[in-house]
Amino acid sequence: MGITIKHAGKAVPKLVVKNEDLNKFVDTDNEWIVARTGITERRIATSESGLDLAVDAAKIALEGENYEEIGLVIVATVTPDKLVPSMGAMVKRELNLPNAIAFDVNTACSGFIYAIWIAEALMKNGMVNKVNGVHTNTINKALIIGVERLSRIVNWTDRGTCILFGDGAGAAVLENNPKEKGILASFVKNYDDTTDSLTCGMEFLKTPFTDEDLDNPEQQTLSMQGSQVFKFAVNAIGEVMEKSLELAGLTADDIAYYVPHQANLRIISSAAKKFKQPIEKFQISLNETGNVSAASVPMALYDIMNTAKIKKGDKIMLVGFGGGLSAGAVIFEV
């Protein structure tokens, strides 16, 4: 039974914000940002909602598909438009996917990897609900989306974080196809963030039952200890890549292309060096997108799947790492 990744989609906001634009309100410059991250620009949503971006990416991934055959929608995000309903539920409604089970996952920048891991398990199980002894949900096709509007939770006066992030969405269609090998291995792991190196608070309304002061404008902004997160990322990406290769019975040389989370060029370069792989085998999209958290991997996947590089039988590795702390990898054959 092969769970294949058939198609991908991508959507980005219209507004392009270059590094030079950031020095208008924070002490930075293009050379400083590029040297530390590899990022030259990012997209920032102004008129676009997260749902707009998610739906646009999904429509590209779903081109040629029968919408009634989509049995599952999982949206990975840390910046949903609403707490209720979920982004998955809103996507299902907007696209009119009558037979889909829909929900969200939040494992930050690893979210798309976790969503594929969940979808693969559900699709292999094949039977989700049982009513009066009859299985009512057999999932043959799934829509997996990563979408973020990180610009809404970034502290735009903090040059250590605001230079890194952008907005966008990526999507993929998975199919249960016994004629294909599809996903060869998947591995996820959580690491306790004991020092709160990557956090974002949540604003709540004050209740009439407490005098606690909840009016903190910085509470719902990203906070990151850059050096600690960098060290974690370098170690975690190596661990999940190595473990997924082991599970698939492959070596690093067997992988045609790697699609890592687009956080920092130095992290990607470190992984390439560790596994003795040419950097050309790693899809690099962050120079134009920045870090788009759960959307980074599917956006980069779309970029590489829509080139002439990939051919039938190629093995691709997707890798995510981020808040939680969390990390994971998926290897699939095209």
Image: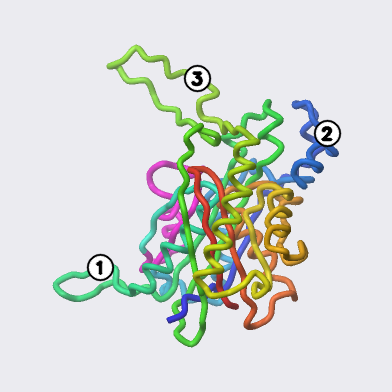
Distance between mark 3 and mark 1 Cα atoms:
44 Å
Spatial distance from mark 1 to mark 2, Cα to Cα? 55 Å
The part of the image, by quadrant, that contains residue 134 is bottom left
Residue 3 lies, in percent from the top left, at 47, 75
Q: Residues within 10 Å of mark 1 (few under 14, many from 20)?
A: few
> Looking at the image, how many numbered discs can be counted on the residues?
3
Viewer-side residue, 199 vs 300: 199
Which numbered disc, 3 or 1, marks the residue that appears first in the sequence?
A: 1
Label 2 is placed on what type of residue? Asp
Q: Which mark is residue 73?
A: none
Which of the colour schemes (rainbow, by chain, secondary structure, one colour) is used?
A: rainbow
According to the image, label 2 marks what residue? 29
**Pointer 1 residue:** 129
Give the farthest residue toward the top: 211
Closer to the observer: label 1 or label 2?
2
Splitting the image into 4 quarters, where does residue 298 fall?
Answer: bottom right
Q: Residue furthest left?
A: 132
> What span is in magenta?
72-100
Does 278 sit above or below residue 221? below
Mark 2 / mark 3, whichever is N-terminal: 2
Q: Secondary structure at mark 2?
A: loop
Residue visible at 79% across and 45% down?
A: 40
Residue 295 % position (x, y)? 58, 53
Q: Is residue 169 above or below residue 15?
A: below
Q: Earlier in the sequence, mark 1 or mark 2?
A: 2
Quarter holding the N terminus is bottom left
